[in-house]
Image: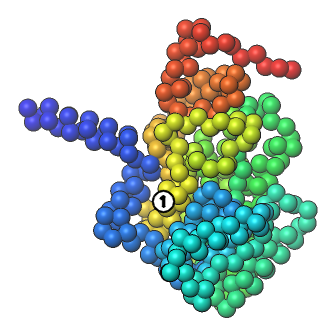
Amino acid sequence: MMMMFSIAWILVVLVVAWNNLDAAPTLYFYDAAATWTGGWQHSSLQNKTIWITGASSGIGASMVCQALQAGAAHVILSSRKRDKLLNVASKCQSLLGSKYHPEHTKMSIVPYDAANNSTTTMEATIVDRVWKACGDDPLDMVILNAGVYQNQPAMLTTKQERDYVTRVNYQAPVDLTQALLEKWKTHDNPKGHIVVVASIMAHGPYGLSSTYAASKAALRTYFWSLATEESQWLTVNMACPAATLTGFWNPVASTLHAGGSAMTADRVAHLILTGISGPYMLFYETWITKMPGILWLGLAHYTPGLFLAFSHFLAYIRVPIWYHERIDAMDVSLLMTRFVQIVMGQYPPVVVET
């Protein structure tokens, strides 16, 4: 009887976890506990000066407002669209309401186009502008969030598209960091904190997003390597979110069919900031995704052979869907429906145009 009760309890826990987890269990339960006991999970951001790239929309815009709500003294917003940054600043000011006081809660705008590589000194110029915006206050933290998505077969991705994705997702943040580190190290007893927004796709092959996954994998590996070299004064956090409901998705696959697996930008931003503020040894890298994304990451790290087979299985279903429906299919029910149709011969084969 006790055995049956134990099994039933475990099954209930698994079902609840499957339906509710939207991050690695340590992060999910840490955040939940902090929320239940007063919402203190972002308290370490108080009085900080934070620079956020990719701040004009989506996760970046949400992080701006949430950092200010947590008590950040100064948030610097960067992206290529100044008008959108102004809108974000206005929205955050409205959300703060009576708590917004310009004398101790400040927002600055420093436009930055990550795709622009016209000059070799552009990043140094941007860093100088950020330093000027900081005034007498030190820059405590940089959140490298700017990025672009790519969803199409590798064979159909042009060199121009590959170069663009690689530039924005990898080369630009690396170049910006180089200029940033040189600036930080001009100070006595330098202390820096970089937060890198990568992706769960940085952890392994993901069909239809070859260049995107590769750029995020390179980004992740570069910054962990950098962290080992400069560990005496530089802190690096890595955030790996999954599908997020933003304007991020490439027009090549204008429809993101993620079902219930996609997360809101506000929730992803909240969990990123929780990871930044929490114990470093627990949250130096955070996985922010619902099921089956957590399962996918677990396979990648603990059973690589099974993970590779699973990745091939997903591509076997997702690639035909992309060709015939131009859908970035991530929803489990859709994938299973199309899998049955493919096996039964009820779904047309892929004919690649040449």
Judging depth in this view, the residue of 71 and 219 nearest the camera is 71
Residue 3 percent across, percent down from the top left = 13, 34
The amino acid type, in three-letter code, at marker 1 is Leu
Identify whether 204 is placed above or below 137: above
- Residue 30 occupies quadrant: bottom left
Q: Is residue 7 left or right of residue 32?
A: left
- Seen at 14% across and 36% down, the residue is 5
Measured along the vertical axis of the image, is residue 140 above or below residue 164?
Answer: below
Q: Image quadrant of residue 354? A: top right
* Viewer-closest of 214 and 261: 261
> Which residue: 67% across, 64% down?
55
Closer to us: 263 or 317: 263
All told, the count of numbered labels is 1
Asked whether residue 162 appears in the rendered view, the answer is: yes
Can you say which quadrant of the picture contains the N terminus? Answer: top left
State the residue at coordinates (77%, 48%). Answer: 165
Q: Coloring scheme of the render?
A: rainbow
Residue 166 image point, x, y percent: 77, 50
Q: In the displayed orientation, state which residue is furthest to the right.
A: 118
Q: Residue at x 72, y 83 (%)?
A: 133
Label 1 element class: helix
Residue 196 visible to the viewer? no
Could you say where residue 15 lies in the image, as x and y percent from the top left?
32, 37
Q: Residue furthest top?
A: 345
Q: Reply above or below: 66 against 4.
A: below
- The residue that mark 1 highlights is 271
